[in-house]
């Protein structure tokens, strides 16, 4: 069963193999690649990722949700959001958005819907994101989602600090 979530402006749905061209267009933009290791920027790597996202959508029980962000009116693939159940009842989140769609609240809108879904399905105690310290836009999105910085670790391989931001989930 394919997952589809809708927001006011967006459709969030499982990746399909037919999304490859749009996915490679998004991930090949130099500005998009700024905060990814060089080896994760090749078309081959990103094609493999898309195949993995499709495979994850078919797993049962399902604990990994990497969804396409699609414009509701245009039906154009404009990014991705992810929610992955991890050990110790935690969930990791992540997102990526086409460069020409950044700065419009799309990532917050999409992640809010996916987090709500994930909390409803799995009731994690903590939701976290990890990003490079220089990724101010991603940090701002995480903060708008209610995540707070919990840890900074040096990553000598990439010569940049990695921030961990967390949201402790409380049940009403």
Image (tube, rainbow, N blue to C red):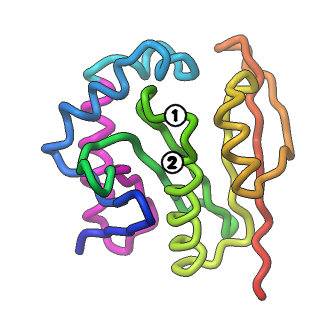
Q: Quadrant of residue 137?
A: top right
The image position of residue 153, as x and y in percent, is 81, 29
| Residue drawn at x 58%, y 21% as measured from the top left | 35
Q: Residue under circle 2?
A: 106
> Is residue 8 shown above or below 41?
below
Badge 1 crowding class, 10 Å Cα cut-off, few under 14, some 14 to 19, many 20 or more, is: some
Q: Are marks 1 and 2 in contact (CB under 8 Å)?
A: yes
Q: Secondary structure at mark 1?
A: loop
Q: Residue at x 25, y 64 (%)?
A: 58
Q: Say which residue label 1 marks.
A: 102
In the rendered image, the vertical position of residue 126 relative to residue 136, given as above or below: below
User: Could you say whether the residue bearing mark 2 is in a helix, strand or loop?
Assistant: helix
Report whether 74 appears left or right of 145.
left
Q: Residue at x 44, y 66 (%)?
A: 7
The number of discs equals 2
Q: Name the side, left or right, on which 65 lies relative to 57.
A: right
Q: Nearer the viewer, residue 98 or 154?
A: 98
Residue 1 image point, x, y percent: 23, 75
The verdict on residue 50 being magenta is yes
Q: Which residues are magenta?
A: 45-70
Extreme residue toward the left, this view: 18
Kindly give the residue lying farthest to the front in the view shown.
73
Residue 140 lies left or right of residue 38; in this view the side is right
């Amino acid at each position: 069963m394919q997952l589809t979530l809708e927001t006011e402006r967006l459709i969030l749905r499982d990746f399909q193999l037919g999304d490859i061209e749009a996915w490679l267009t998004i991930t090949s933009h130099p500005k998009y690649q700024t905060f990814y290791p060089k080896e994760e920027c090749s078309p081959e790597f990103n094609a493999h990722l898309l195949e993995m996202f499709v495979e994850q959508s078919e797993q049962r029980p399902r604990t990994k949700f990497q969804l396409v962000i699609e414009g509701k009116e245009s039906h154009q693939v404009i990014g991705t959001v992810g929610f992955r159940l991890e050990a110790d009842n935690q969930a990791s989140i992540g997102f990526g958005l086409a460069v020409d769609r950044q700065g419009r609240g799309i990532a917050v809108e999409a992640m809010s819907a996916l987090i709500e879904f994930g909390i409803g399905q799995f009731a994690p105690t903590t939701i976290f994101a990890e990003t490079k310290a220089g990724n101010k836009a991603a940090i701002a999105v995480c903060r708008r989602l209610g995540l707070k910085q919990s840890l900074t670790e040096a990553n000598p391989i990439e010569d940049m600090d990695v921030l961990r931001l967390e949201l402790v989930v409380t049940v009403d």
